[in-house]
């Protein structure tokens, strides 16, 4: 027995139920057990209700004939294909519209964000008006605007609007020249891939030299010329193995080329203009976060405004911008599910819509769709986290 601070005896041993570690483990176990019990109750209740209503369970429907067509397919599909094939068509359509929209939203957002900081009063305020409009209007209304208010008012195919590069615009969507690749196109493709790999090696070598000596070899211009020039030389030496099927406007209809449906075009324009407003603010915030002393130092060294932005400001601003871009890309991918409102055949429309209505298996459909979006979000986050580590500044 030992004597406490106030002269009272105290035991050296602590009763097990007073041990903080044991109590912590006990309450964690109780919480885990409660969560497991809750999920088990929900699962058991769902199974019982499905049996009571004679609704099929499981994924036996996966290989059943779908019996419906899909307007836009990246892989071969017909009404005789299976529900599983329809799932992949919807997933690929979702990934396509998301990737294309992310690309254009990034370009437009960076451009608008830089314009927001322009010294020209008119340019800066026009950029601000764009951001405030598209950032504060619901995306669903923006999609309806482009689909019903713009593309829905286009002329019929026989009165198509002719755009440069043999592009036609009408109610059927955007008709563009379709590339036709000959067998010999493989040679310039191999040349392009080879020069890209060689350019990446040169870029890595230049960074190593810069880290060791402080001087960066001028490998960028050489790599760019090599990546563009060598494939072009091989292309012409191979007999120009590329031709185009040009869309032709007929008396009653337009034929030829490839068609981008109005639903796809509306989705890309809507997601791009909406997300670009948020990206623009992220870019502006990242640039503003850089001390003005950096700009003054660059100007004192004789750098132009463009060089200052490209070589001094943006590399540092990326530390702020990239984590924010992760959230915007995740939101864009999930927002693509709104395509069901204008008839775009994405995963939600095809799988959670048509397939669910025909099979009645809501639990399986919704669960698979949720798992797909969760997977896409985790993959996007993993890539952006990797990219964030790549662009992070290393303090010496």
Image: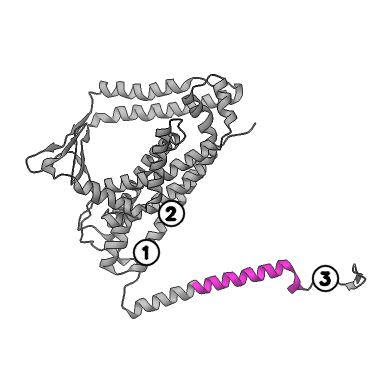
Nearer the N terminus, badge 2 or badge 1? Answer: 1
Q: Mark 3 points at which residue?
A: 13
Q: In which quarter of the image is the N terminus?
A: bottom right
Q: Give the range drawn in magenta.
A: 14-38
Q: Where is residue 308 in the image (x, y as percent from the top left)?
A: 51, 26
Residue 251 position (above or below residue 310): below
Q: Where is residue 209 in the image (x, y as percent from the top left)?
A: 56, 23
Q: How far apart are marks 3 and 2 (CA)?
A: 50 Å
**Dot 1 lies on which element?**
helix
Q: Quadrant of the C terminus?
A: top right
Residue density around tag 3, few if under 14, some if 14–19, many if 20 or more, within 10 Å:
few
Circle on res. 366 = 1
Residue 66 on the magenta segment = no
**Dot 3 lies on which element?**
loop
What residue lies at 30% left-to-right and 27% top-to-bottom?
Answer: 188
**Dot 2 lies on which element?**
helix
What residue lies at 47% left-to-right and 34% top-to-bottom?
Answer: 117
Residue density around tag 2, few if under 14, some if 14–19, many if 20 or more, within 10 Å:
few
Q: Where is residue 326 in the image (x, y as percent from the top left)?
A: 47, 46
Q: Based on the displayed image, in which of its 4 quarters is residue 124 positioned?
A: top left
Residue 55 position (above or below residue 354): below
Q: Distance between the residues labelled 2 and 1?
A: 14 Å
Q: Mark 2 points at which residue?
A: 375
Q: Position of residue 2 (x, y in %)?
A: 91, 69
What residue lies at 40% left-to-right and 33% top-to-bottom?
Answer: 123
Residue 18 on the magenta segment = yes
Nearer the N terminus, badge 3 or badge 2? Answer: 3
Residue 175 position (above or below residue 366): above
């Amino acid at each position: 027995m030992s004597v406490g601070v106030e002269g009272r005896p105290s035991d050296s041993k602590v009763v097990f139920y007073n041990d903080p570690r044991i109590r912590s483990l006990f309450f964690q176990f109780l919480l885990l057990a409660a969560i497991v019990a809750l999920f088990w109750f929900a699962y058991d209740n769902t199974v019982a209700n499905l049996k009571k209503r004679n609704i099929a369970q499981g994924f036996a429907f996966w290989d059943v004939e779908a019996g419906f067509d899909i307007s836009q397919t990246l892989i071969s599909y017909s009404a005789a294909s299976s529900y599983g094939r329809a799932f992949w068509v919807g997933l690929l359509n979702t990934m396509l519209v998301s990737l294309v929209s992310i690309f254009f939203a990034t370009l437009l957002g960076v451009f608008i964000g830089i314009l927001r900081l322009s010294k020209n009063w008119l340019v800066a305020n026009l950029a601000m008006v764009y951001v405030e409009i598209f950032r504060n209007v619901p995306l669903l209304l923006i999609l309806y605007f482009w689909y019903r208010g713009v593309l829905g008012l286009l002329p019929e195919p026989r009165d198509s609007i002719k755009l440069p590069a043999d592009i036609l615009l009408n109610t059927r969507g955007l008709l563009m020249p379709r590339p036709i690749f000959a067998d010999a196109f493989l040679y310039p493709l191999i040349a392009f891939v080879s020069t890209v790999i060689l350019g990446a090696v040169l870029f890595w070598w230049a960074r190593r030299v810069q880290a060791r000596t402080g001087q960066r070899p001028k490998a960028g211009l050489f790599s760019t010329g090599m990546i563009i020039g060598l494939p072009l030389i091989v292309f012409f030496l191979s007999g120009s193995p590329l031709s185009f099927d040009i869309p032709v406007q007929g008396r009653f209809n337009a034929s030829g080329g490839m068609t981008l449906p109005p639903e796809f075009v509306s989705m890309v324009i809507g997601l791009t203009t909406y997300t670009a407003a948020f990206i623009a603010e992220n870019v502006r915030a990242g640039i503003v976060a850089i001390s003005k002393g950096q700009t003054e130092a660059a100007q004192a060294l004789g750098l132009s405004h463009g060089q200052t932005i490209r070589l001094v400001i943006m590399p540092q601003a990326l530390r702020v911008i990239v984590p924010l871009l992760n959230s915007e890309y995740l939101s864009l991918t999930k927002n693509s599910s709104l395509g069901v409102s204008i008839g775009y055949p994405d995963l939600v429309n095809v799988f959670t819509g048509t397939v669910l209505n025909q099979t009645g298996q809501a639990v399986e459909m919704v669960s698979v769709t949720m798992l797909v979006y969760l997977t896409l979000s985790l993959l996007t986050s993993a890539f952006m986290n990797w990219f964030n580590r790549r662009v992070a500044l290393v303090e010496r």
